[in-house]
Amino acid sequence: MSNHNSLHLPVAICTLLNRLFRLPVHPFNLQSSGFKTYAEWQFDKGSQTIRFFLEKFSPDEIYMNKVLLDIGCGAAGKSLYYAASGAAFVYGADIVTSYMEEALRLARAKNLSDKFCFLIADAASLPLDSGSIDTVIMNDAMEHVADPEKVIAECARVLKPGGRLFINFPPYYHPYGAHLSDLIGIPWAHLLFSEKTLVRTYIRLASSLPDGDRRVALRMSRGDTEDLLHPATYEVKKIHVKTHHVVTPHIAYINKMTINRFNKLLLTQKLFLVEYRHDVPLRSFLKLPARLPVLKEALTKMSVAVLQKIPDLRPTETRSL
């Protein structure tokens, strides 16, 4: 078998297997079909972003009359849901600059512009004053941040003493933990195929879509790189725009956060009290097997935690907008 064919074979197998599975509902596909925008989808699903906290905390305790920070807000539909539901003011923070226009458009449509601000910012270095935030929400964001430990510390800085950080995220070994399910619907695809194969398959599937370039840039790009796509093998080489060195292609959209890694993070941080910790199984009938260490990572739908900033912790730094 030639090297050219050996490059093709895993991608061909992955592509064929993918045809056997229906894609889960995904906002990127809803937007590309013209059904609703990403921001509108987020707004409509806003109540679901806090449902895993409601066993212990009421919506009033989470956001009512509070200054709230939504980290990893995407197009900020969920941020605007909090604003519409009684938050005093909401900051939505994301590093994807293209989301800002969509977020501000929805804010105007919902008459919420006076209660919302979109921050193009790294969650590890926020342009907010110390002690200025009542509540931080990280909904489906912990698995995306580049430096989780620094993000936790930054949340502590911007929170008022006694303020809370609400976290929920799907762990890496979740059936769609590779975060490619807008185009690859194979459950646990990242356990069945190498990352290189998934990258090539995703790009191959995206190549026929009008927004394919944007999706690939979001999933695969990080930093000062540009893509060179081989039209026959769908192999991507990432070239640093300054040094021209080849960067190994990878899924840069996630940090592969596992339950085990998250628990270690909670144990080692010294800035918060852990008020609530829970792992939600994929299905209720999987509750017992999902408790087994060997199966827990793969059978967990969502890892959930609520942290309270230690009340006597004083902010030491200020950053202005």
Image: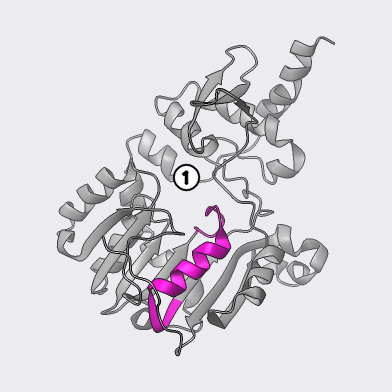
Which image quarter holds the C terminus? bottom left
Tag 1 residue: 26
Q: Amino acid at mark 1?
A: His
Q: Residues within 10 Å of mark 1 (few under 14, many from 20)?
A: some
For residue 297, say whether it is visible. Answer: yes
Residue shown at the point (69%, 30%) measured from the top left: 197
Horizontal side of residue 261 vs 147, given as left or right: right
Which image quarter holds the N terminus? top right
Residue 234 picture location, percent across and down: 61, 19
For residue 43, say whether it is visible. Answer: no
Q: Nearer the viewer, residue 26 or 57?
A: 57
Residue shown at the point (46%, 78%) measured from the top left: 54
Q: Is 77 situated above or below 277?
A: above
Q: Nearer the viewer, residue 29 or 73?
A: 73
Q: Is 103 situated above or below 267?
A: above
- Quadrant of res 298: bottom right
Residue 283 picture location, percent across and down: 64, 64
Q: Is 144 situated above or below 204?
A: below
Tell me where the magenta segment starts and ends, as one range. 140-164
The residue at the far top in this view is: 2
- Quadrant of res 314: bottom left
